[in-house]
Image: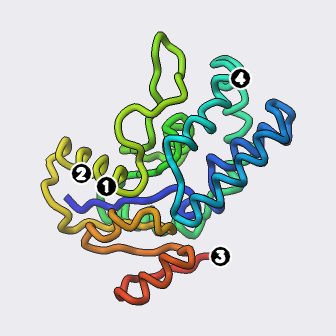
Amino acid sequence: MKLTIFDLDNTILKGDSDYSWIEFLINNNHVDGDFYRNKNDYFYDQYVEGKLDIHEYCEFALSTFIVLGKEKAEKLLDIFMKEIIEPMINIYILRILHKHYEAGDTLLLASATNSILVNRIGARLEFKNIIGTDPEVKDGSITGKILGDPAIGDGKLKKVVSWMRDNGKLDFSETTFYSDSINDLPLLESVEKPIAVNPDDRLRKTSVLRGWEIVDLT
């Protein structure tokens, strides 16, 4: 099996879906603007610096779904996909994705973002295999906590390895990973072919030092 893994935010998308979801809610007066904007900016800066407490962040991000309620959240997600996510899809990375598809590669979307968003976006992009950070659900309601490992850093690597074992792939031979973020370093170091897409400053420096391919897209 030739496996090609894609990160989502700032790789396939021209921006961050989690951050954009909260901004969408703020701009349309669905949540407390002052509270959510300050927290959203704080956590995004922490992510960029590679210092994000994923459990703390997910409790914050998932609180939006708790506040909205399931029915309202579903309706707003439909609008969010059309108005915000569609324009964020980078057609240049889609061309790369389709080349791998035409070559017969198995495609896997692996994102640190909560699976509520990732599953919707992945379905729009026609991914059959999707990994995200799964929210805990009890009695049909989101608790705000994470179920299992968060799909960031070592956690993303663990979830990809688990997916590979479940699908009969026992090692990282013939495996490629596209990512923009230093947060994905554990998985980038594991695959046969790591590719940095519009990398952040730390990942760019690491890629240059290690001779990894860098793809700068418009």
CB atoms at circles 2 and 3 under 8 Å apart? no
For residue 17, above or below residue 66: below
Tell me the kind of residue under disc 1.
Leu
Write down the residue under mark 1.
157
Judge whether 72 appears above or below 5 on screen. above
**Element marked by disc 2:** helix
4 or 2: tag closer to the N-terminus: 4
How would you rate the neighbour count of disc 1 (Cα within 10 Å): few for under 14, some for 14-19, many for 20 or more? Answer: many
Q: CA distance from mark 3 to mark 1?
A: 28 Å
Q: Residues within 10 Å of mark 4 (few under 14, many from 20)?
A: some
CB under 8 Å between discs 4 and 2: no
3 and 1 marks in contact (CB < 8 Å):
no
- Dot 1 lies on which element? helix
Q: Amino acid at mark 2?
A: Val
Q: Which residue is mark 3?
A: 218
Quick one: label 1 or label 4, which is nearer the N terminus? 4
Q: Nearer the viewer, residue 166 or 33?
A: 33
Q: Quadrant of the C terminus?
A: bottom right
2 and 1 marks in contact (CB < 8 Å): yes
- Which of label 3 and label 4 is nearer to you? 4
The residue beneath circle 2 is 161
- What is the C-alpha distance between the residues marked 4 and 2? 34 Å
Instruction: Report the amino acid beneath label 4.
Output: Leu
